Amino acid sequence: ATQKIDNFYTVRNLIPDFFENRDPMSEDIQKILKSGAITPLLNQGSPAEPIVIVFQFTEETLKLPLKVSIKAIFMTFDILMKEEDRAVISGFKIINDCGTIAPSHILLFTPMLVRNFVVCLQNVYPMRLKEFVGLNAPGAFDTIYNTFAKPFLSEKMRKRFHFVSEKFWTEKDGSIISLENLEGQQSLKELSEQWCHKVNSYRDWFIENDKLSFDEKLRLGKLSTDLGSEGSFRKLSID
């Protein structure tokens, strides 16, 4: 737990692309939010069940650098940590719809971005990722995951990542995960619009948060840039 707290603040200096300039009203972040890309399903499931976060690669997200989508996802995490005890206690699942990804979009998934994203998921946020399911995933995703992501994940975490070419995933208990099954009384579009307003309401908080930094001069001991990740290339890029 102490290491994750250290990681949580250290990573803001190591990977500024993910954690700086997070004004929700900026043009790029607004494009992500208004496209319906991010939808936490806060009213589904019991308090003991993980919160489901739907991320859809919309046409708008694919026009932007991947780091913008990642930034918006981590902004969502920050809000959930402040408002939803369930996210910290029971964890969360990410359901990622990849149906709009064309072969030309694969170049968006650079080794550095993919590696840094999964290391942050595993080692930075004090919320447990219980499952990551990629639906409608292109065949190239297996190569991207196995080459750029899997080496940096623990054995336990590797078992929580699944990519399928179909529009549904069957859980061990036989339940089916699909975008259609995730819709309740409100559509994903309606819920994503509500989440857009929620993120916008945190504008002052994000702007103030951007002013904070981790003073490495006060650190006791040596800075570790691997954040506890595994694999042969352990250090995160700090370009």
Image (tube, rainbow, N blue to C red):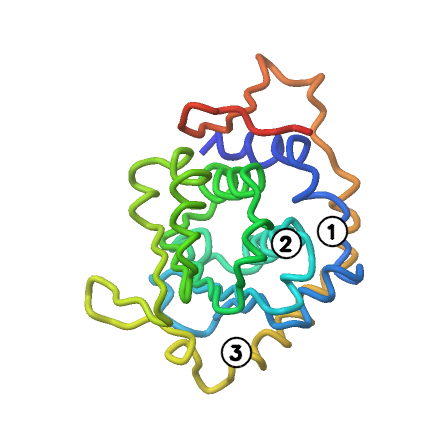
Q: Residue at x 68, y 72 (%)?
A: 34
Residue 22 bears which disc, if any?
1
Where residue 75 is drawn, which disc sits there?
Answer: 2
Question: In the image, 22: left or right of 72?
Answer: right
Q: Residues within 10 Å of mark 2 (few under 14, many from 20)?
A: many
| Side of 118 where 218 appears, left or right | right
Which kind of residue does numbered mark 2 sit on? Met
For the residues marked 2 and 3, what is the alpha-carbon distance in whole angstroms? 19 Å
Do residues under tags 1 and 2 come within 8 Å of each other at their CB atoms?
yes
Name which residue type carries label 1.
Answer: Arg
- 239 relative to 189, above or below: above
Name the residue nearer the viewer: 211 or 103.
103
- Left/right of residue 21 with respect to residue 178 in the rendered view: right
Q: Which residue is mark 3?
A: 188
Residue 64 to residue 230: above or below: below
- Which disc is residue 97 wearing? none
Secondary element under disc 1, as helix, strand or loop, is: loop
Give how far across and how far down residue 190 sits, in percent.
58, 81
Residue 232 in picture, x, y percent from top left: 42, 23
Q: Mark 3 vs mark 1: which is more N-terminal?
A: 1
Foreground disc of the pair 2, 3:
3
The image quarter containing residue 138 is: bottom left
Kind of residue indicated by mark 3? Leu
From what the image shows, is residue 30 above or below residue 221?
below
Callout 3: few (<14), some (14-19), or many (20+) C-alpha neighbours within 10 Å? many
| Quadrant in the picture for the C terminus | top right
**Residue at 67 percent of width and 67 percent of height:** 60
Give residue 182's position: percent from left, percent from top: 41, 76
